[in-house]
Amino acid sequence: MSLELLNFNLRCVDGDVGQLCADQCQTKLEECTSTCDGSPSCNSRCNGEWLDCLTVCPCYSGCPEGCQGCPNPICGDNSAKKHLFVIDERMGDYNKGMHWNSETEEIQFRNINYNYSWQYDIEDTCYAMMNGEHYLLGGWYNRNAVAKIEDCAVKKQDVVLE
């Protein structure tokens, strides 16, 4: 095995898709090894499948330019990459977010429930995408809060940051 196989292209424009793909490969590895009962040959097979999976992820050695020319199904339809949804605290009072289609330059305001009922603010939050899900971490008033964007709403999570 060469380290070249695992090189991640830090300048790759599809880094978020590459990370999502790598997360999916990791989940498959964990599912595979959970059925091995400690068998070295089974674990070896699972690790080989993980390496094959990771190698063809966008931004990894099999697709170093990201989704451009990459046959990985995660790249799919590029139309999803032509949209941007902006959550802005100033629009929170109106429960609106801005949806921008970069292909048509069309801007629409869409409904999103900011859930101020539990006093979550999005000012000074950090954003993270994990396993294809969007999270807001911290905030001006709730520094330890964790919220997830789902079903057009900011939903408070039971876990908190340390």
Image: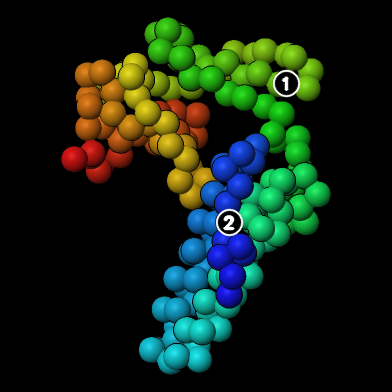
Question: Disc 2, disc 1: CB below 8 Å?
Answer: no
Tell me the SS state at disc 1. Answer: loop
Q: Does any portion of residue 120 appear in the rendered image?
A: no
Q: Distance between the residues labelled 2 and 1?
A: 30 Å
In the image, residue 128 lies at what x, y percent? 43, 37
In the image, residue 106 lies at what x, y percent? 73, 14
Position of 95 with respect to 6 (left or right) is: left
Residue at the spot of label 2: 7
Residue at the spot of label 1: 102
Considering every residue shown, the one lying at the far left of the view is 162
Tell me the SS state at disc 2. Answer: loop
Q: Quadrant of the N terminus?
A: bottom right
Residue at 33%, 19% in the rendered image = 124
Q: Which of 8 and 39 is in front in this view?
A: 8
For the residue marked with disc 2, what is the amino acid? Answer: Asn
Q: Quadrant of the C terminus?
A: top left
From the viewer's perspective, is residue 107 above or below residue 150?
above
Residue at 50%, 14% in the rendered image = 96
In the image, residue 108 lies at what x, y percent? 65, 13
Q: Which of marks 2 and 1 is nearer the N terminus?
A: 2
Position of 118 with respect to 125 (left or right) is: left
Q: Nearer the viewer, mark 2 or mark 1?
A: 2
Res 45 label:
none
Residue at 70%, 59% in the rendered image = 62
In the image, residue 150 lies at what x, y percent? 47, 36
From the viewer's perspective, is residue 33 above or below residue 87?
below
Q: Does any portion of residue 85 appear in the rendered image?
A: yes
Looking at the rendered structure, the number of numbered marks drawn on it comes to 2
